[in-house]
Amino acid sequence: MKRKKIYNPQSNETTNERKIFGGNPTGIFELNDIKYQWAYNLWEMMLNNTWFPKEVDMTRDVNDYKHLTDPEKSAYDKVLAQLIFMDSLQTNNIIDNLNPFITSPEINLILVRQAFEEALHSQSYAVMVDSISTNSEEIYALWRRDMRLKSKNDAIAKVYDELSVNPSDENIVKAMFANQILEGIYFYSGFAYIYTLARSDKMLGSAQMIRFIQRDEVTHLLLFQNMINSTKKDRPELFTKELEDDVYQMFRDAVKLESQWGQYITEGQILGLTDDIIEQYIQHLADKRLHAVGMKKIYNVENPIKWVDNFSQFNNQKTNFFEGNVTNYSKGSLDLDDF
């Protein structure tokens, strides 16, 4: 597997011959002639979702943070440190590690946009850290001192490293699943914790920031789920029993890792997030992600914290419960029938 040429005038590849990877593109973006319509729909949605971190008022969080309990502060700092790592990883991974092998122009567009959004999320975390921390360097350096955090980071990065070392067809497919897992599982115990604070009327600015970030992550999740499903149609020979077994193991490992992380950051001291609830919630998410790509569920459990969904949704002309202002979020609604 070689990286695509950025300019390839010798190519005579037709639209129908186009592949997500392993194709032979000219390098020209002919966006009036596309193969994957879902990709262009998603591109337009991502553009409509544009937002900027400084739009979020963090004023109240400064005082709220001072009055958090020690366990609440510790969990908040660890959540931020973990989120900082994942969006830093994704910004580089998407551009340097994955996009060079993607040969569908309409999907190249989305990956570039995703990388921009991951970088924007990094700025969001910087705003959050600067707002609440007296020493921002402590949070940014936490991954060096907290071995549980570093161990999780190392595990997440491993699959991406395998792609960079051995860019085979199989490893590209595995990287798609790894991205689905990152966007659809690894962020979520941290998100749930921030929403739990907001449910108790604490750190509402932080929760609002996470809502914007999560809305972006949903589109990223849709991207990789559709890439997987489209690759299944175009190149079914890649989805062997051995590959599926590896993918199921990836999900089991991810559930274990994220459940243990969620239990570690909350330490059994955050009201509404017991160890069992965290584990069941992550298992529920894994089943949803597997189902979305046509694979069997592993755990068959219900969502134990359905109220989290209420904290993460934008609705048209809905009062923003954090600020009490009516805001039109119709541009950010997700119509899954388009994908």
Image (cartoon, rainbow, N blue to C red):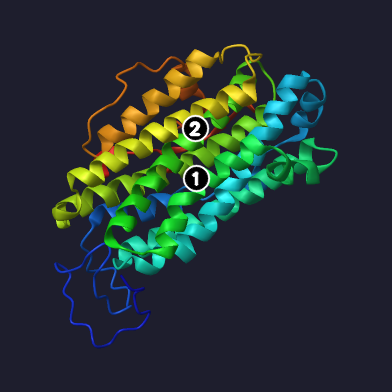
In screen coordinates, is 127 left or right of 12? right
Residue nearest the observer in this picture, 266 or 247: 247
Q: Residue at x 30, y 42 (%)?
A: 246
Q: Is residue 244 above or below residue 268?
A: below
Whether residue 206 appears in this view of the structure is yes
Q: Residue at x 21, y 37 (%)?
A: 294
Q: Image quarter for residue 322?
A: top right
Q: Could you tell me the amino acid type at mark 1?
A: Ile
Residue 104 in the image, given as x and y percentages of width and height? 29, 66
Q: Secondary structure at mark 1?
A: helix
Q: Is residue 245 above or below residue 46?
A: above
- Are the two marked residues, 2 and 1, in contact with CB atoms closer than 8 angstroms? yes
Q: Earlier in the sequence, mark 2 or mark 1?
A: 1
Residue 150 in the image, given as x and y percentages of width and height? 62, 42
Q: Residue furthest bottom?
A: 10
Q: Residue at x 15, y 69 (%)?
A: 17
Mark 2, residue position: 257
Mark 1, residue position: 156
Q: Secondary structure at mark 2?
A: helix
Q: From the image, which quarter does the C terminus lie in?
A: top left
Residue nearest the observer in this picture, 300 or 145: 145
Give the tally of numbered discs: 2
Q: From the image, which quarter does the N terminus lie in?
A: bottom left
In screen coordinates, is 70 left or right of 155? right
Q: Residue at x 35, y 46 (%)?
A: 177
Whether residue 321 appears in this view of the structure is no
Q: Residue furthest right?
A: 134
Q: Could you tell me the amino acid type at mark 2?
A: Leu
